Structure formats: C-alpha cells, structure tokens
Image (spheres, helix red, strand yellow):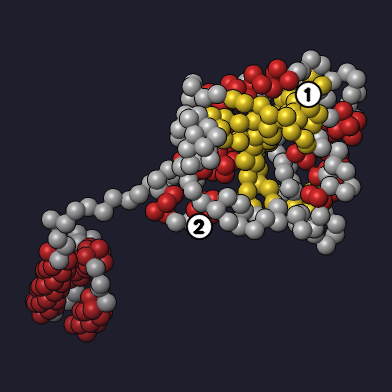
Amino acid sequence: MNAEDIAGIREEALREAAEITDIAALEAFRIKYAGRKGVLQDLMQNLKTADPADRPVLGKVINEVKRDLLALLDERKKAFESAAQAQVAAFDITLPGQWPRPGSRHPISQIIERVVDIFHSLGFTVAEGPDIETVYHNFDALNTPPHHPSRDPQDTFYLDNGDLLRCHTSPVQVRYMEAHEPPVRIVVPGRCYRRDTPDATHSANFHQIEGLYVDRKVSLADLKGDLSHFARELMGPDVKVRFRPHFFPFTEPSVEVDFTCHVCGGKGCRVCKQSGWIEIAGAGMVDPNVFKAVGYDRHQVVGYAFGMGIERIAMILYGIHDIRHLYENDVRFLQQF
C-alpha cells in the first residue's frame, strides 16, 4: 500500500458519491467506505504491514481521506433531508382527504343476483348456454313456425354460416333438457339480441332470465304460486299479481304476468299509464311439441316456463326512465346503485 493507492481509492469514492440520488444510496455508500468493515477501516488495518518509515505519512493521508468522505456524507445527508422537508411543506395538510371510491356491482348484475337468489330458495339451479345459437335450438325446437315474424332477418341477427345471435335464453332450456332427464328446475340468465331500434325502452342487446320446471305433476297453479312468491320477495309483501291470457309458440296455455305498479300501488299513475299494473313476464305451460323435440315423453311429463327482462325490472325498481342509461357507463349514474 502506498499514497497513490489511497489517492485512487479517494477518487473512486468521490465518483460514486456524485452518482448518489437518494438517502438509501447514501447510507449504502457510508457503510461501504466508513463502516466498521468498510474500505477506510481496511486501510487502517493494512497500515500495520507498511514500512515503519512510511506509516506516519500514509496514516496522515488515510485520515485526510476519512475526514473528506465523512464531511461529504454529512453534506449530502443534510441536502436530502432539506429536500424531503420542502416536499412535506409543499403539501397543505389542511386540505380535506381524497377518499377512494370503492367499486360496486352494476344494477343489471344486482338484479340478476336478486332474481337468482329468490328462485334458488325455491329449488332452482342456474343453467347457461352460448350466445351464438343454431336456428334449430332458437326456433325449431321451441315450436316456432316457419312463417313466424321473429325469424325475419329484420328482427334477428343472422351470421354468415346460418347461425344467429339468440333472441332469448329459451334455447338454453332446450339444450338442458336434451342433456338431462326430468325432473328439471332451472333459471337461465343471459344476454339476448334483437334488431330493435334503440330508444328509451328498447335495445338491440339486453338481458333476460327464464325459468323452467318439468316433472310428472306440474300445473298452472304451481306457476302462479312460484311467480307470486317471486313478486312478493322482489317488490314487497303488498304487491299483487295478475295473469292474462296470451300466446307464445312454445307454451300452451300462455299468460302475460303483471305486477301492481310499485310507484302508485295500483291506483294508476304515469309510470303504469294509469292502469295500476306493470307487465313483467311471459309464461305458460310448456307445449308438448317442445318435449317431443328434446326427446321427453310428452305423455309422462308436464312443465311450465317463464321469461322476463332484467332491464325492465331494473327500470321499475330503480325508477330509470331511459334504458340507455344502463349502458353508457356514466359513473355519476352507476354510483347511485
């Protein structure tokens, strides 16, 4: 060891110190050079092996390097602390805090969960199926005649290969019955697609939830009882339910299901167009031709089916006047739910 070696170490230390950008790097530098096992301590230990005549000079040089590095460490530490204090001082602690807003379930998802929970308490399970369907599952197996207007390309989204975007979730009922023997008790939530012109109450992409109950002894009374229970659970114990004769290709007899208006309680208002009733669902007893299509013995089993629009329920429960609000992703609107 000689004076030139010590000078080289000093230059290397000064170069490293110039590259330090934060307090953590500064502490690592201090340990490397001024720590108990650092470079300066090694120099003092190696001084014992130097020529006795050179020791006073080398010791003086080592002490000068140590003094310079310690002064540099102190200077850089004060600079970093001053910068940190200035940053803290720039923050106004009297300002109100900005609390993060937690996310929430979309109103459509909330309604689906509520409906599924209600029917789950009645013994129903959830079934799902593809959004892209065959004409057979979407129309033929559901007893829809060839001339029915819903088959028209003006009403249905057809694909180039002849398949289509499902118009309702009823095809899932067909697929489920093809794969399972009775008894069957399912609800089917999902997206549907129709060529509707978007306005305040219509959308080309919407959600439905349908139900199917098939067994040896199922009657229209079971349908009325289950939907009445659903209405009370969803809209309160005072709601009343009305069943009106209707027609659907896949049910016979068929009914439209109305609930008393949640706004006026059945007295008549603008929401229910002064009728006191809100149309909620279509339902009926499964047509025997549907059982024949899925391979069930139509003489041995009977069943009921129903379907309702999720967006319609959301609009009724939450007082939403325009269905498009549900899809515009306006946080100011969605955060209300």
Whether residue 112 sits left or right of residue 154 in the image: it is: left
Q: CA distance from mark 2 to mark 1?
A: 39 Å
Q: Secondary structure at mark 2?
A: loop
Whether residue 199 sits left or right of residue 168 in the image: it is: left
Q: Residues within 10 Å of mark 1 (few under 14, many from 20)?
A: many
What residue is at 51 percent from the left and 51 percent from the top?
Answer: 322
Is 330 above or below relative to 270?
A: below
Is 159 above or below relative to 9?
A: above
Tell me where residue 95 appears, x and y as whole percent: 16, 57
Mark 1: which amino acid?
A: Gly
Q: Which residue is mark 1?
A: 303
Q: Quadrant of the N terminus?
A: bottom left
Tell me where residue 112 appears, x and y as whole percent: 57, 37
Tell me the quarter of the picture where residue 182 sits.
top right
- Asked whether residue 285 is in view, the answer is yes
Residue at the far top in the pictured view: 217
Tell me where residue 337 appears, x and y as whole percent: 43, 43
Mark 2: which amino acid?
A: Glu
Q: Which residue is mark 2?
A: 328
What residue is at 63 percent from the left and 48 percent from the top?
Answer: 206
Tell me the quarter of the picture where residue 88 sits.
bottom left
What residue is at 28 percent from the left and 50 percent from the top?
Answer: 99
Is 135 above or below relative to 10?
A: above
- Asked whether residue 63 is in view, the answer is no
Viewer-proximal residue, 245 or 176?
245
Is 267 above or below relative to 41?
A: above
Viewer-proximal residue, 97 or 320?
320
Viewer-proximal residue, 91 or 316?
316
Q: Secondary structure at mark 1?
A: strand
What residue is at 50 percent from the left and 57 percent from the top?
Answer: 328
